[in-house]
Image (cartoon, rainbow, N blue to C red):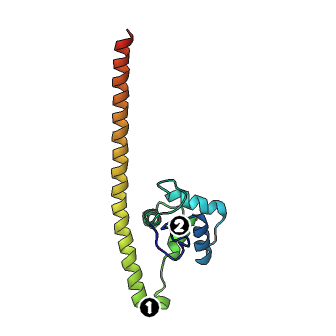
Amino acid sequence: MVKCLYDSGKDGYIDLMELKLMMEKLGAPQTHLGLKNMIKEVDEDFDGKLSFREFLLIFHKAAAGELEEDSGLMTLAKLSEIDVSTEGVKGAKNFFEAKVQALSSASKFEAEIKAEQDERKREEEEKKHRRAAFRELKSAFSQ
């Protein structure tokens, strides 16, 4: 769940309109289609909104170089940078500690995603095996 000041619905997610407002307040407004594409690029569960995990995925993809330079998500990732002269050293320290935490969380998420993908592959293989066994049994009865 995303807990931030842009979650106006207080449901723990950033939906399309909340993302629109966030990007406008950050000084990088996007088109409606651009916002939809931003969500689509990291929306793992296809619910049309960003969970905390999906929100962190933006920064992970940016750090890994997986985002297009002119994409809305890259713009959002770049907007998360901090100016020490305005925030001060303590603000920068808090920012970087949060960033490190997000990156370590992202690698945990990456491992989780890989495990989920492996599980899906294993289930698909089992399903194919069961179908083949069923066809074999069916052919024995049809003769």
Q: Residue at x 47, y 82 (%)?
A: 82
Q: Nearer the viewer, mark 2 or mark 1?
A: 2
Q: Secondary structure at mark 2?
A: loop
Residue 142: image location, x then y, percent: 39, 11
Q: Is residue 114 above or below residue 134?
A: below
- Of the numbered discs 2 and 1, the one sitting upstream in the chain is 2
Residue 7: image location, x then y, percent: 53, 72
Residue 132: image location, x then y, percent: 36, 25
Instruction: Please name whichever residue, 38 or 128, is drawn nearer the observer in this view of the structure.
Output: 128
What's the CA distance linking mark 2 and mark 1?
A: 29 Å
Mark 1 surroundings within 10 Å by alpha-carbon count, few (fewer than 14), some (14 through 19), many (20 or more): few
**Relative side of 78 to 97, left or right:** right
| Quarter that holds the N terminus | bottom left
Mark 2 surroundings within 10 Å by alpha-carbon count, few (fewer than 14), some (14 through 19), many (20 or more): many
| Quarter that holds the C terminus | top left
Q: Residue at x 48, y 68 (%)?
A: 12
Instruction: Please name whichever residue, 89 or 43, is drawn nearer the observer in this view of the structure.
Output: 43
Tag 1 residue: 88
The residue type indicated by label 2 comes to: Ile
Tag 2 residue: 14
The residue type indicated by label 1 comes to: Gly
Residue 108: image location, x then y, percent: 33, 62
Q: Extreme front residue here? A: 10
On residue 23, which mark appears? none
Q: Residue at x 34, y 46 (%)?
A: 118
Q: Secondary structure at mark 1?
A: helix
Q: Is residue 118 above or below residue 5?
A: above
